[in-house]
Image (cartoon, rainbow, N blue to C red):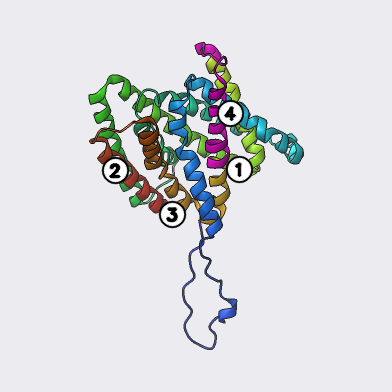
Amino acid sequence: MPAARPATAPATATATPAAHRPPAHPLPTADLLLLAVSIAGISLSGPLISATAAPALAIALWRNVMSVGVLGPYALLRHRAELRGISRRALLLAVAAGALLAVHFALWMPSLRMTSVASATALVTTTPLWTILLMRLMGHRAPRMVWLGTSVAFAGVLVLTGVDLSLSPRALLGDALALAAGLAAAGYMLLGAEVRRSVSTTAYTLVCYATTAAGLLVICLATGTRLSGWPTGVWWQIVLLMATAQLLGHSLSNRVVRTLGPSITSTAILLETPGAAAIAAVWLGQWPPAAAYPAVVLILLGLVLVARGGRR
């Protein structure tokens, strides 16, 4: 979060000279463009998963396996000493974060086959709300605007789940999976933030993604999920998902958060919901029912209030 702007000094002989005042830093255009690319990559995730003719759990597994394959050689080459020296506590927390990320993928990706892309995406982006609630249980107090935003967003969740219940119990189950995936992601983010106090992003990401892949492999084997035997086009879709959503989407958002700040970055990522809904409508012909639009607007409004309140 950028530092607060200093108050203007009075016009006296002892006032700070203009040459020594901290200059105002405009938002870097290059990072704003990178953020736009990140949002586009993340927005493609839901529609692409929905369109890929492979089991959702298998897509989740191979997406993470491929990410480890791309990231691993670089991490082992440049961060080998750090990986060897990670403390036991940091390693356990990174493994726990990876396990929660595996749960997140195992819940959210099947939800895209049960409810609309718009509903699943809107509900899984409630991660900030779950983060606020988890932090409250840990003793942290949030500003009033954060709680107002949480209430507005959960009102939208209730409206949206009511709309999907009127469509089918399957759609409602998909909503529940997406909400639970948002909760798992909140735990993953809180643990990851703690690990990154002492571990670089590259080293942490390698341990986390490797754990996620291992966890998803166990889930796939336990559920008898088919892991191969698809046409070549399906594999290219999974590669595209890994490149756009994982490497471009999440990696670029992690890159620009240092300069743009968490408030701007997290608020902008909320554009994933309308972006994914628009792509699903044009590409897959998934047009949500009219009653779902006000619910999605309420969820997004609540999340914006949470982001603004968190910035204060």
- Observer able to see residue 88: no
Residue 170, x across and y down, in percent: 32, 20
Image quadrant in which you'd find residue 67:
top right
- Disc 2 packing (10 Å; few <14; some 14–19; many ≥20): many
* 73 or 24: nearer the viewer: 73
Residue 176, x across and y down, in percent: 35, 26
**Mark with earlier residue (4, 2):** 4
Residue annotated with mark 2: 298
**Mark with earlier residue (4, 3):** 4
Are dots 1 and 2 in contact, CB under 8 Å?
Answer: no
Dot 4 falls on a residue whose secondary structure is helix
What is the spatial separation of the Cα atoms under label 3 and label 1, in whole angstroms?
Answer: 20 Å
The residue at 56%/56% (across/down) is: 30
- Disc 3 packing (10 Å; few <14; some 14–19; many ≥20): some
What is the spatial separation of the Cα atoms under label 2 and label 3, in whole angstroms?
Answer: 20 Å
Dot 1 falls on a residue whose secondary structure is loop
Residue annotated with mark 4: 64
* 190 or 61: nearer the viewer: 61
The three-letter amino acid code for the residue at tag 3 is Arg
The residue at 63%/37% (across/down) is: 204
